[in-house]
Amino acid sequence: MVPFEAMRERDTVETSLSTVIVVVGGPEELIRAAQRTATDIPGARIETCDLRNVATTVAKFWPFAIVMSEDMYAFDPQEFEALARDVAALLYKTKTDGQTARTLEDSMRPALLQAVYERFE
């Protein structure tokens, strides 16, 4: 077990300024939309994960945004909200059924650009 003192001394400057977007699950169109949106953000990159390792992935990368489908979000809304709050990330959830990557990208771009702006202001 890690002592609380060691956790408090963690260097949060590096992690809190992350330009990572974590995409939970998918589908592939959602991942592609996030990848395309990331090209508008200098240094941004995508990390994908599944439901089993979302907490570990978010803790590792301290993303500025967590992206997921509404179906994934419905699995445990309170936990996802808490996880995003813990790392000061935008929790972006969207309907993905029947959506193209372009449509998803157009809807997520403003929210993600605003989130990265707020992270670095």
Image (cartoon, rainbow, N blue to C red):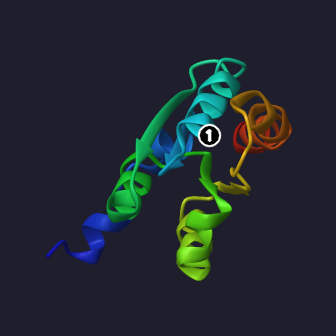
- Left or right? Give the position of 50 relative to 36: left
- Give the amino acid type for the residue marked by disc 1 in the picture: Leu
Residue 49 place in picture, x, y as percent: 39, 49
Please name the residue shown 66% across and 31% down the image: 33
Q: Is residue 60 above or below residue 101?
A: below
Whether residue 18 appears in this view of the structure is no
Please name the residue shown 63% across and 33% down the image: 34
Mark 1 residue element? helix
Whether residue 78 appears in this view of the structure is yes
Q: Nearer the viewer, residue 19 or 5?
A: 19
Please name the residue shown 69% across and 50% down the image: 96
- Left or right? Give the position of 39 relative to 45: right
Q: Nearer the viewer, residue 109 or 43?
A: 109
For the N terminus, the quadrant is bottom left
Q: Is residue 42 above or below residue 77?
A: above
Residue 36 place in picture, x, y as percent: 66, 22
> Circle 1 sits on which residue?
30
User: What number of labels is visible?
Assistant: 1
- Left or right? Give the position of 34 relative to 79: right
- Left or right? Give the position of 59 relative to 42: left
Q: Is residue 110 above or below residue 84?
A: above
